[in-house]
Amino acid sequence: MKRRTFVGTGLSFAGAALLPAQTARGEGFNRVRPGQPGWPAAADWATLGEAVGGRLAPVSMPDLSGPEARALLANPFYLADQPALTESSGWQDAWRSSPSAYAVTAKSAADVAAAVRFARAHNLRLVIKGRGHSYLGASNAPDSLLIWTRHMDEVTVHDAFTPQGSTASPVPAVSCGGGAMWLHAYRAVSVEAGRYVQGGGCTTVGVAGLVQGGGFGSLSKGFGTAGAHLLEAEIVTADGEVRVVNHAREPELFWALKGGGGGTFGVLTRLTLATHELPQTLGSVNLDIHAKSDEAYRRLLAKFVDVYAENLFDPHFGEQAHAGPDNHLRINMLFQGLTPDEARAAFGPLVDFAAANSADYEGQERFSVAGVPIRHYWDGKIMTLTPGAGVADARPSANPNDFWWEGDSGQVGVYWYAFQSAWLPQSLLLPQNRAGLVDAWFNATRHFSLSFGFNKGLAGAPEDALAASRDTPMNPDVLDAFALVIMGFAGPSLFTGAQPSAVIGRAVRERVDAAMKALRACAPNTGAYVNECDYFQPDWQRAFWGEHYPRLLRIKRRYDPTGLFTVHHGVGSETWSADGFNRTA
């Protein structure tokens, strides 16, 4: 069952004083690097080390030589356990994974607050890393102080939870530390407690990072975004204060955390998310049809659009359909709330179409549908024994339940040459607009392979999921989109000694640009998903957040007027250099 194929001390809350706006520096302000005047002396670092219980250390690269190291570098759990490494090794002409100068291995909000106050006092570049999955390198900055939340990974299930200061009725929920990953959240909530929490599809992705980006998972078409389920958050802001925020306490900051971008408004140290009744069954649909001519391929794509619009455009189906220059239509989709027979019937017209035209198509006879009790889906002892499903973390010290999806193996440590995304509006599924969608899709495949992520567009979701997702900072285009189109290409991990190729990079970018231009003929002005997008995204403020950007910028200026928290294409980053060291405006 493949999921996919591709690619301080003390507390201070609502009444806490904020940093005064007049302390913000203007153009020409630079953060310090090692060896420059103002860099903390050894005694200063020692003081910070004492404040965080000795959990401060210089960061250095692990020994990556030898066959054992090469095997470890293919393991996303190993990468996440190294303060010097990130899940991607970089992006051509953009960033390359590099160790911070020092790291605080945070175990509490007090540790985080001490590090934040130190960075502010000494004018340091500050970076936050939980699991390190950011494609854009948000958790990476050489010459910085790293707040590493990886070990703040506790998960606690609540039968009834009410946010602090709220009069709302209690609801079932789960609290996750700032460094927790989704696999552990799913295991606690679904495998052990028999509930469901809306999170990410990749098992090793961090809860905090995904939520702050909005957050899609395989079942988002049924339940909405992860950010929409946030009930409360504990966050350390730029003034070094620990705040608990929710709809009743500091609601503007709370709203910003539901999709305003990670690493921007502070350091999340705990998140509490609402949970749902668990669906009984989760299943997969796998189909690979090859068209023997270009014209047959165009007709196949048209038939799939018809079948999707009429049978699959609903809360039940998520994940992806892939198409490319090789004239294959590869479907790797998941479903919930249906029986395998119902899912098989929904795809019947597509399979029957290919079978009835066997002179033009091949592969339809290998159509497969499978289902499992959904509680088994995140049970590593089951999934690692299921062919094509899970890969176990085989390190001797590993949790026996830890695994990642086989379909995600190709992304571990990769070096990105290109990645783009765009939302496709549901109006394209109207009968009169389908031909235009098919033309744009087919024309794009002449340049590059692309995937439709149906769970990453919320059109077709239940009204309650739409309403909750509407109350987030994400670009409203997501509410009207039936899918997110994504396309990208990555080379071998630089951690293994591979060297990037400028020639390959240019060629790939040209092809991806051409494919997106062709696809954009049917969706010229829609936004992109901040967690999966182009590092060089033009007009990124509008693309990621649309009409919500001015509100987000006001919140950023209130809680972080000096730009202590700066990430590439994050709210307020337009006034900083690309590396986050120099204020430009």
Image (cartoon, rainbow, N blue to C red):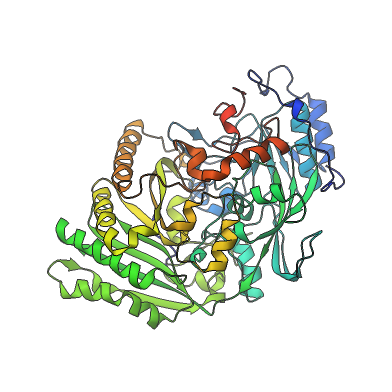
Report the side of 32 relative to 540 (left or right): right
Report the side of 206 relative to 74 (left or right): right
Task: Using the image as rendered, state which of residue 20 and residue 241 is in the foreground.
Answer: 20
Residue 46 in the image: state x and y as whole percent.
82, 32
Residue at 57% from the left image edge and 59% from the top image edge: 469
Quarter where residue 28 is shown: top right
Report the side of 494 relative to 311 (left or right): right
Residue 462 in the image: state x and y as whole percent.
52, 69
Q: Residue furthest left?
A: 359
Looking at the rendering, in which quadrant would you find the N terminus?
bottom left
Quarter where residue 338 is shown: bottom left
Residue 298 in the image: state x and y as whole percent.
20, 59
Residue 108 visible (yes or no): no
Residue 419 in the image: state x and y as whole percent.
41, 44
Residue at 62% from the left image edge and 72% from the top image edge: 276
Report the side of 310 relative to 117 (left or right): left
Numbered-mark total:
0
Task: Using the image as rendered, state which of residue 106 and residue 487 is in the foreground.
Answer: 487
Q: Say above or below: 355 vs 535.
A: below
Looking at the rendering, in which quadrant would you find the C terminus?
top right
Residue 375 visible (yes or no): yes
Q: Residue furthest right?
A: 10
